[in-house]
Amino acid sequence: MTVGRPREFDPEHVEDVAMKLFWDRGFDGVSISDVTSATGVNRRSIYVEFGSKENLFDRALRRYLAGPSAYTTDALTRPTAREVAEAMVHGAADTVSGEVNGCLAVGEAPGLAEFRNAAVHRLAERFDDAVADGELSGVDTLLLARWIAAVCQGIAIQARSGASRADLHAVAELALAGWSSAASAGVNSRPRSRAE
């Protein structure tokens, strides 16, 4: 008796399907069996390619960051700190109210807390540049970055709870109305270290 070769498949297609499943249901709500059912690819082939559910999630997250969540990378290139903040909150409103509501990165999957923390630090570094350029002054850039991240995550939770895209953009605008106060928060506050 000859054992047949595993069915050939496109790993990028599996990543795309897995991304949408994880995005919709969260890490704990998706099993490898769910992925096999949705893709038609057998378990063995998925394990040979990805090794584990955690590795599949990691690749699905990378796909999400390069695709639906690419607005975060684009936002960091905006010319002013205010435009960075605007691109972040409005980008979140658009992304989390699309084909799937909510955010893949807001959950309890392995590595997500570290990912979110790293994203906050990248945003804080962009705000550090604004301080160095004289655009912001005397601001706790890490606190400012955490505020923007909290707004984006809150928008994602509200989308998951059924808020409309228009409502989410209104929330984004309301948050931006507080930019001047938030951008000056932390004046004379403790200096932060990169390790924070």
Image (tube, rainbow, N blue to C red):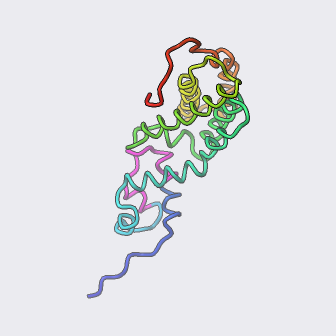
The residue drawn where x is 62% and y is 39% is 97
Decide whether the magenta segment is chiefly helix, strand or loop. helix
Q: Which residues are magenta?
A: 19-37
Residue 189 rendering spot, x and y as whole percentages: 53, 13
Instruction: For the C terminus, give its image quadrant.
Output: top left
69 or 163, which is in the foreground?
69
The residue drawn where x is 49% and y is 49% is 61
Instruction: For the N terminus, give its image quadrant.
Output: bottom left
The residue drawn where x is 48% and y is 66% is 11
Residue 21 rendering spot, x and y as whole percentages: 48, 51
Residue 84 rendering spot, x and y as whole percentages: 67, 33
Q: Is residue 8 left or right of residue 84?
A: left
Residue 39 rendering spot, x and y as whole percentages: 47, 64
Q: Looking at this rendering, what residue extends furthest in the left direction? A: 1
Q: Looking at this rendering, what residue extends furthest in the bottom direction? A: 1
The residue drawn where x is 50% and y is 43% is 104
Q: Please, is residue 189 above or below residue 44 in the view?
A: above
